[in-house]
Amino acid sequence: MGFFKKTTHHAKLNAPAMVQVAAIAIITIRCVDVLMVLNVLGGRGIIDFVQRSAQTWALTLIFLGSLLLVFIEILCAFSVVKGRNWARWLYLLTQLTATGYLWAASLGYGYPELFSIAGGSRREIFRSLMLQKLPDMLVLFLLFIPTPSRRFFRLQ
């Protein structure tokens, strides 16, 4: 006779279109990044890249860290649609980490051949970096700025 018991089920809000677009964009950007790297390097280049990355502990950690960063970003995309506030903050942290490392590696700190942006001056490097990170900045805009997005994460 469980028909007459009081149940307290609360309806969940559907993710706003901007949050859904942001999540799809995160996944799409990462998949396209991987495909572009595979296209540029080719089969032999991928093998050389992995072998070069495994030469020292520091390079191996950087390589594994970059793979972990991609998986964390994809996890954030799926979690953002569920309304997890920590996911959008973690995505922001991954973008700050990636941008900081690319900037440092491009200026000669770290291992510039592995992950760096070519440029003759700091200004050119910064411009190229910002153009490369523009899609990610737009995703962050969709997650943090519009009122429906903020309300969605606040109410979850």
Image: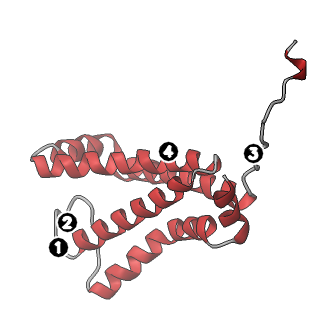
Q: Position of residue 138 (x, y in %)?
A: 58, 70
Residue most toward the left?
56
Sequence-earlier tag: 2 or 4? 4
Q: Position of residue 49 (x, y in %)?
A: 23, 47
Query: Which quadrant of the view contains residue 18?
Result: bottom right
The amino acid marked with disc number 4 is Leu
Q: Is residue 69 left or right of residue 6?
A: left
The amino acid marked with disc number 1 is Gly
Q: Is residue 34 left or right of residue 65?
A: right
Q: Are marks 4 and 3 in contact (CB under 8 Å)?
A: no
Which element is circle 2 on?
Answer: loop
Q: Position of residue 146 (x, y in %)?
A: 68, 71
Q: CA distance from mark 4 to mark 3?
A: 20 Å
Mark 4 burial class by Cα count in 10 Å: few <14, some 14-19, many 20+? some
Query: Which residue corresponds to mark 3?
Result: 12
Q: Position of residue 19 (x, y in %)?
A: 66, 58
Query: Which residue corresponds to mark 4?
Result: 75
Query: Which residue corresponds to mark 2?
Result: 112
Asked whether residue 73 appears in the rendered view, the answer is yes
Q: Are marks 1 and 4 in contact (CB under 8 Å)?
A: no
Q: CA distance from mark 3 to mark 1?
A: 49 Å
Q: Is residue 6 left or right of residue 41?
A: right
Q: Residue at x 28, y 49 (%)?
A: 65
Which element is circle 3 on?
Answer: loop
Q: CA distance from mark 2 to mark 4?
A: 28 Å
Sequence-earlier tag: 1 or 4? 4
Residue most toward the top?
1
Query: Which residue corresponds to mark 1?
Result: 108
Q: Are marks 2 and 1 in contact (CB under 8 Å)?
A: yes
